[in-house]
Image (spheres, rainbow, N blue to C red):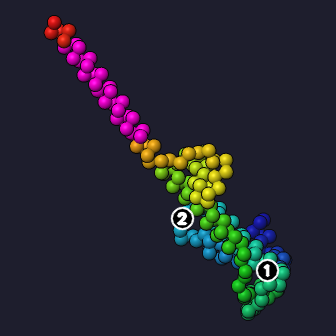
Amino acid sequence: MVRELLYKPSFEKAFLSATALADTAINESFHSLSLMYSSKRFHCSPHYYRLKTKLSVLHYNSLVMQDLLGMRWETGNTKLTRKGKVIIAVKRKRGPGVHEWRREIMVESLRVREEINEQQYARRIGIPDDDVYDEVIKWWEEKEEGTLGEYEEWEEWNEEDADEGEEEEENEEEIDGNEEREREARISDEEGI
């Protein structure tokens, strides 16, 4: 029964007249455009495939929007006749579009990449995740500018003070060494008696 229905001349005539207005040019143009971003020749993970598909949607939508606003001009057209179709299709070639979103995405991508690289470098050299590093940098910049502000009570590090500290440590070591020798001498004297 289905076979008889499909092969009836009346069904064929009705089918051809119904599909005369159907057109897949919009889908085909999007699919060819999407291959610019996600080629079938290269495999990528689903995450990156979704990102590439979103880029192709942005590209296609910006072209369509510029067509609607009259910002793209027609550079040529070709008539395409199709067997069984009532309407003659026209393939239009248009001028290039202006894609401001590409620049915005590139600027943001570079900013995020720099931020990630700085975080990885800071982690690699052992800078803590808290704001201590930022406070030290702020203090250093204020010190260089001569406007220490709230850190004015901090004393400058002085090599002479550091040398005095080292001398005190050496003196303490000498005293500890003398005490040790005196104790050993007393023990040996007591054993000798």
User: Gap in Å between the C-alphas at discs 2 and 1?
Assistant: 32 Å
**As displayed, is residue 97 above or below residue 148?**
below
Q: Position of residue 77 (x, y in %)?
A: 74, 92
Instruction: Report the disc number at residue 155.
Output: none
Residue that appears at 61% across and 66% down: 110
Which tag, 2 or 1, sits closer to the chain's start?
2
Which region shows up in magenta?
Answer: 164-188
Q: Quadrant of the C terminus?
A: top left
Q: Position of residue 120 (x, y in %)?
A: 53, 54
Q: Residues within 10 Å of mark 2 (few under 14, many from 20)?
A: few
Q: Nearer the viewer, residue 127 or 174?
A: 174
Q: Position of residue 65 (x, y in %)?
A: 80, 77
User: Looking at the image, which residue sits at the far top?
Assistant: 193
> In this image, 7 relative to 44: left or right?
right
| Label 1 residue SS | helix
Q: Nearer the viewer, residue 28 or 14?
A: 28
* Mark 1, residue position: 66
* Mark 2, residue position: 43
Q: Nearer the viewer, residue 125 or 42?
A: 125
Give the dominant element type of the magenta stretch: helix, strand or loop. helix
Q: Give the quarter of the image for residue 26.
A: bottom right
**As displayed, is residue 20 above or below residue 145?**
below
Q: Magenta stretch: residue 169 in it? A: yes
Q: Position of residue 122 (x, y in %)?
A: 53, 52
Callout 2 amino acid: His
Q: Is residue 4 visible?
A: yes
Callout 1 amino acid: Gln
Q: Give the quarter of the image for residue 172.
A: top left
Q: Magenta stretch: residue 174 in it? A: yes
> In this image, 147 relative to 90: left or right?
left
